[in-house]
Amino acid sequence: MNEEKKSLNFIEQIIEEDLAKGLSKDKLRFRFPPEPNGYLHIGHAASICLNFGLGLKYNAPVNLRFDDTNPAKEEQEYVDSIKHDVQWLGFKWDKELYSSDYFQQLFDWAVMLIKEGKAYVDNQTSEQMAIQKGTPTEAGTDSPNRNRTVEENLDLFFKMKNGEFDEGSHVLRAKIDMAHTNMHMRDPIMYRILKKHHHRTGNDWCIYPMYDWTHGESDYIEQVSHSICTLEFKSHRDLYDWYVNQVYDENLLRPKQREFARRNLSYTVMSKRKLLQLVQEGIVAGWDDPRMPTISGLRRRGYTPESIRNFSEVAGIAKRDNVTDVALLEYCVRDHLNKTAPRVMAVLDPVKLIITNYPEGKDEWLTAENNQEDESAGFREVPFSREIYIEKEDFKEEANKKFFRLSIGKEVRLKNAYIIKAENCVKDENGEITEIYCTYDKDSRSGSGTEASKRRVKGTLHWVSIKHAETAEVRVYDRLFTHEAPDTFKDKNFKEFLNPNSLNIINAYVEPSLKSAKVLDRFQFQRLGYFCVDQDSSKDKLIFNRTVPLRDSWAKMNK
């Protein structure tokens, strides 16, 4: 039992304690409440996996609720993308809900608070209100409008609702305590005027509730037992409780807000505002650019739902803000793709190799294992011929003893094929090698069972048959930023750390089995890395995105 307790994260411990104190298990309900003002990123995935994971652990429902209270920034496009991302990650919500579902109820409760003398309309400027709010060490001062009569406040609030005032001219504030030690409790704004079209309610409303007023009351309406937020909302907890207490019925469940540290990832930015800036300025190709930390970008790059869920589990739930090394995320996708991705051969930087003693015009089809980690993956046939491509870096005219690839006078094995020996090479006027001439041991074919096939050589190279190869565009992605914390400098713009080599587009040759590959199919290009078919790919033009290399080359380069 003690071992089980140790394995619980601190959020699960809170829930277990509440259950031990008498909370009925059938009263457990969780929610994931994104604002539809952008695409979800890897930080949101932590919250998704936590909330839906709690639902699975406790067999409790989880709501997907859109915090759609700011029509100036929210769009249906974002709603649709969020739903797609949650489903793609493998989770199902109990109810699809919107804060806008509660606009009338929230308004009615606001009217109730005005009648109880707990809310008032203020028509000061935002600058005036900011000055009156004081500082964390100095009490604020009351607004001159704080003691308006109930009748006057009701009249002004209904005029706000009816569109009789300009944006920014009036707000509704809760009347709490301008001397409170928590700045959020110093008469916070509940409603502001926004004469914007809402993606669900159209033009029905021109006043919209603020996040703090909406969030706790929505949890209460839905009878959410545990409202799990990120750490920046810890200071809002007093206000969350105050608002809920104003409408609380003792026959209903009072929701409990608790906080965990948001997921920050090295070599990226997680601010929606900054991500939107990258999109709007054309620095990336869109929200789903494979260099973006968005779930849609990771999906397009070739990440699997399993790898992201595993990353969230391994990275854990913390009480304090920290930065998770992106190498952990890359490890998780490598680990999963190693078990599931078919192995194929592709040459990204080709040089022609001619096997001089292989019969001209002869083709043969060699049997290759699809994935040695998965017995059920089966086999495929790979064509072989006299002329093939290998990687330029796999050949040196002269090499030392530590170079186990091809050089003049040395032997290597061609993957799934024969042992070859380099005899000579041809260079162009710039000294670049254009052709390599080899001979092969015809009895050394892999799997043939001959003594020659069992002969050991130190190097094995991947290759593609020139006459059978398919051409493909390969987009080699790297990290978008060169600094591990690009947005932490007060005196520098985060864009100063953009990596100029974050995308390299090359033309490659791939084995013909990939002609039938479909969008989002994932493969290991042997000895090179993991790659995914991009959505721009077509039957006439294959396009692959590199998900990750086989090894962490970045760490090696930056030691």
Image (spheres, rainbow, N blue to C red):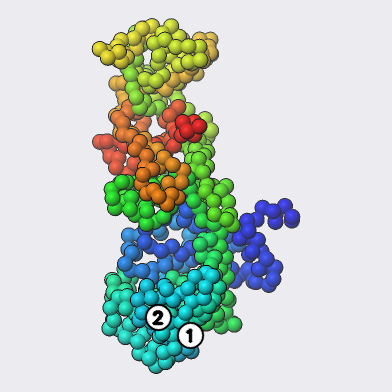
User: Observer-nearest residue: 468 or 326?
Assistant: 326
Check residue 172 in the rendering and tell me which mark sits there, or answer none.
Answer: 2
- Name the residue rendered at 30%, 83% in the picture: 162
Image quarter for residue 35? bottom left
Neighbour tally class for label 1: few under 14, some 14-19, many 20 plus, Cα within 10 Å? some
Q: Say which residue appears at 39% left-offset and 93% top-offset.
A: 151
The answer to whether any part of residue 298 appears in the image is yes
Q: Residue furthest right?
A: 2
For the point 32% across and 78% down, the residue is: 169
What is the three-letter code of the residue carrying label 1?
Answer: Lys
Apparent side of residue 535 relative to residue 98 in the rendered image (left or right) = left
The image position of residue 276, as x and y in percent, is 34, 54
Q: Is residue 350 left or right of residue 379?
A: left
Residue in view at x 50 percent, y 11 percent: 401
Q: Quadrant of the rendered structure where residue 166 is?
A: bottom left
Tag count: 2
Residue 385 sits above or below residue 287 on the image = above
- Specify whether residue 336 is in view: no
Badge 2: residue crowd in 10 Å (few <14, some 14–19, many ≥20): many
557 to 171, vertically: above or below: above
Residue placed under numbered mark 1 in the picture: 118
Asked if labels 1 and 2 touch by Cβ distance under 8 angstroms, the answer is: no
Q: Secondary structure at mark 2?
A: strand
Looking at this view, is 400 or 413 the one in front? 400
- Residue 399 percent location from the top left of the image: 44, 12
Amino acid type, residue under disc 2 in the picture: Leu
What x and y, as percent, mark residue 421?
42, 9
SS for callout 1:
loop
How far from the left and from the top, in percent, is residue 226?
57, 67
Q: What whole-number distance in Å separates the C-alpha atoms at marks 2 and 1?
A: 11 Å
Look at the image and tell me in which quarter the N terminus lies: bottom right
Which of disc 1 and disc 2 is earlier in sequence?
1
